[in-house]
Amino acid sequence: MESQSALAKMGCLKFHFSQMGFRQRPQISLPSGKKIQALTVTCGLRDANKKPMWRSRVLSSEAIQAVHAMKLAKSSSKLEEVFQSRICRLLKADLLDTLTELRRQNELDLALKVFNFVRKEVWYKPDLSLHSDMILMLGKNKQIAMAEELFCELKKEGLDPDTRVYTEMIGVYLQVGMIDKAMMTYETMKVSGCTPHKLTFTILIRNLENAGEEELVAAVRRDCIQYVEFPKKFLEEVYQKHRKAEVDLV
C-alpha cells in the first residue's frame, strides 16, 4: 500500500474524503491483521449510458501510419518529429482513433503523450469517458499514483466523477490489492450521489471473495438490496459465474 506521504502529494482524494466526514476509514472498514495480496480484476462500465467523444470506426490510413511512426521512434527527438510531422496534422476523429488504438495495444507511454496532446487542442472539451478509459489503462499497468492524479484533475477540468470513473478507480486499487482505498472510493461514490452499477458490485464481490474478506463481502451484498433491481437474481448470476452455488442476502 502506498504511504500516507505519497497520498498527501496527491492531496485531492484525501481532500474529498475529509470533506465528506471520513477520518481514517469509511463506514465499511477493513478487518485488521490481514495481508492483502495482489488481485486480478476486470473493470469498466462498457454499457455506460454516456456516449463517448467518438464512435468506433475503421482506422484511417493516417491514424494507422501515425501509430506505426510513434512505435518506430526510438528516441525523444524522433518521437517529437513524429508529433510535428504527423500527429499535429491529424483531424480530430483520426487523433482520437489514434489514442484508442494505442490504448488497445497497451502502449502506455505513447497513449499518455497523445492524451495530453488531445487535451491541449482547441476543440477539446473535458470528457468523463475519455478520462475513464485512461484511468482503466493506468490501472491495468499498475500506475496507481498516475491514476489518482488523473482522477483529481477531473475537478480542475470542471467535471465531477460519475459511476464509471469511481468504478474504474475501485478497479485500479484492487489491481494491486489496496482494498482499504478501494472501499474508501466505494463509500465516497455513494456519498457523492453516484449509484453503484452492477459491474461495481461484481468487481467488489469477486475480488473481496478472492482476498478472503468475508465481512466486506457481506456488507457489499447487503448494499445490493438497496441499489440493484432483483438483487437475489443478480447475486445468483455473480456467484454462478464465480462458481459459487448459494446466495444469502442476509
Image (spheres, rainbow, N blue to C red):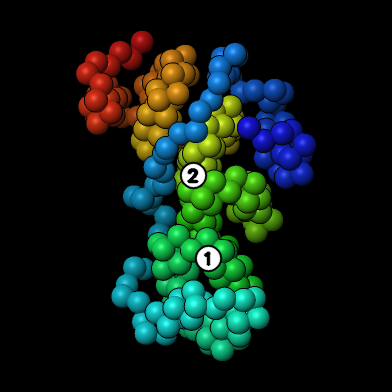
Please report the residue visible at 49 percent of the width from the left and 44 percent of the height from the top: 168
Amino acid type at image mark 1: Ala
User: Foreground residue, 108 or 120?
Assistant: 108
Please report the residue visible at 34 percent of the width from the left and 68 percent of the height from the top: 56
Above or below: residue 160 compared with residue 41: below
Please report the residue visible at 37 percent of the width from the left and 38 percent of the height from the top: 199
Q: Pick the quarter of the image with the N terminus.
A: top right
On the image, the x and y values in percent for residue 209 come to 40, 23
SS type, badge 2: helix
Above or below: residue 247 compared with residue 1: above
Whether residue 214 is visible here, answered yes or no, is yes
Q: Residue furthest top?
A: 250
Q: Which residue is mark 1?
A: 111
Label 2 vs label 1, nearer the camera: 1
Q: Quadrant of residue 13?
A: top right
Q: Quadrant of residue 53?
A: bottom left
Above or below: residue 180 compared with residue 193: above
On the image, the x and y values in percent for residue 113 come to 59, 68
Q: Which residue is mark 2?
A: 168
User: Quick check: marks 2 and 1 in contact, CB under 8 Å?
Assistant: no
